[in-house]
Image (cartoon, rainbow, N blue to C red):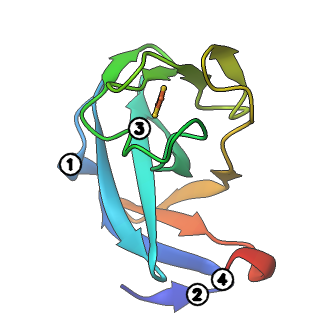
Amino acid sequence: MTEKHGFIRVCEISAIKNGTHRAFDVEGRSILIMNVNHIFHAVQNRCTHLDYPLEGGRQLGCEIICRKHGARFDAKSGRALDGPAVNRLPVYPTRVVGGWVEVAIPPHHA
Ligand code: FES
């Protein structure tokens, strides 16, 4: 992974098909990258209910559903849309440069 201007190169866009997601280790954090109609969203790959990994959960449009107890999160805002989770998921800025997905991890999260 290469760091430029605060953004970290994570994967090629072809690594995540439309309507799917994958988790990556970025700066020691597990980050879930979701492809929603070719727009990439990055969220923390840990449910805010009991820390269960969100990777492998059902993805419905911009939403990801935790496999453990069914909490539903909006990948754009991180908002918990349905319980049992109530806390928002951290979300991270993304951009696509030269066919690569890049994610910015804020300094206080690094
Ligand atoms: S750990 Fe995700 S809903 Fe409980």
Q: Which of the two discs, 1 and 3, sits closer to the camera?
A: 3
The CA span between labels 1 and 2 is 21 Å
Q: Which mark is residue 34?
A: 3
Are circles 4 and 1 on residues that touch, CB within 8 Å?
no
Seen from this angle, which residue lies furthest right? 108
Q: Earlier in the sequence, mark 1 or mark 3?
A: 1
Q: Is residue 38 left or right of residue 84?
A: left
Reading the chain from its start, which is encountered first: label 2 or label 3? Answer: 2
**What amino acid type should be assigned to the residue bearing mark 1?**
Ser
Residue 4 numbered tag? 2
Tell which circle, 2 or 4, labels the residue nearer the N-terminal end.
Answer: 2
- Characterize the local packing of mark 2: few (<14), some (14-19) or many (20 or more) Cα atoms within 10 angstroms: few
Name the residue carrying label 4. Answer: 110
- Local crowd size for mark 1, using a 10 Å CA cut-off: few (<14), some (14–19), many (≥20): few
Residue 87: mark in rendering: none
Q: Earlier in the sequence, mark 4 or mark 1?
A: 1
Could you tell me which secondary element the residue under label 2 belongs to? strand
Residue 57 sits in quarter = top left
